[in-house]
Image: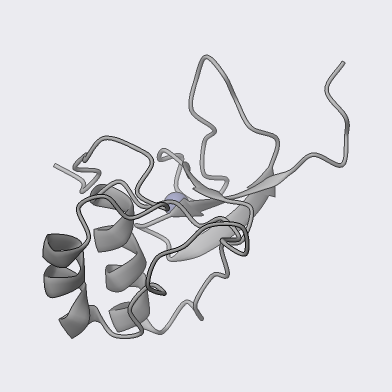
């Protein structure tokens, strides 16, 4: 059995909410708010306030570029950008960033 304390922040980009859920290996967790897909953000993810749409757009852009939110005490690399306006250049300038662990994806609703 998985350890019950092993929960990871998952985000719904439609609701701008995050939920701590156990990681799923074979299927996506579902948002309790809208029934959409929850995206696994990583253990260090700090959800912005729901009304802060700029910050939610920023974390979604980073997520779609393959970044995940883990502690990088043990790795090197510049810190993730603070502002949405900085994300495009950050992604372009850091193709091999240690937190860029997933293939790029587009999670926007159709
Ligand atoms: Zn939702």
Q: Residue at x 83, y 22 (%)?
A: 2
Place of residue 33 in the rendered image (x, y in percent of width and height, measured from the top left): 52, 52
Q: Residue at x 12, y 73 (%)?
A: 89
Taking 25 as reference, is 97 above or below it? below
Foreground residue, 94 or 54? Answer: 94
Foreground residue, 101 or 39? Answer: 101
Place of residue 85 in the rendered image (x, y in percent of width and height, measured from the top left): 16, 83
Q: Is residue 75 left or right of residue 64?
A: right
Place of residue 84 in the rendered image (x, y in percent of width and height, measured from the top left): 23, 79
Q: Is residue 41 left or right of residue 19?
A: left
Place of residue 54 in the rendered image (x, y in percent of width and height, measured from the top left): 29, 81
Q: Is residue 85 left or right of residue 56?
A: left
Foreground residue, 61 or 72? Answer: 72
Looking at the rendered image, the quarter that the N terminus falls into is top right
Number of labels in the image equals 0
Looking at the rendered image, the quarter that the C terminus falls into is top left
Q: Residue at x 34, y 49 (%)?
A: 100
């Amino acid at each position: 059995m998985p350890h019950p304390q092993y929960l990871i922040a998952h985000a719904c980009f439609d609701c701008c909410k995050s939920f701590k859920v156990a990681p799923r290996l074979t299927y996506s967790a579902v948002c309790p708010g809208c029934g959409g897909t929850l995206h696994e953000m990583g253990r260090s993810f700090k959800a912005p306030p729901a009304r802060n749409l700029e910050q939610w757009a920023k974390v979604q852009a980073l997520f779609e570029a393959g970044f995940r939110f883990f502690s990088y005490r043990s790795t090197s690399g510049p810190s993730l950008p603070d502002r949405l306006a900085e994300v495009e250049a950050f992604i372009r300038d850091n193709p091999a960033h240690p937190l860029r662990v997933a293939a790029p994806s587009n999670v926007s609703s159709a």
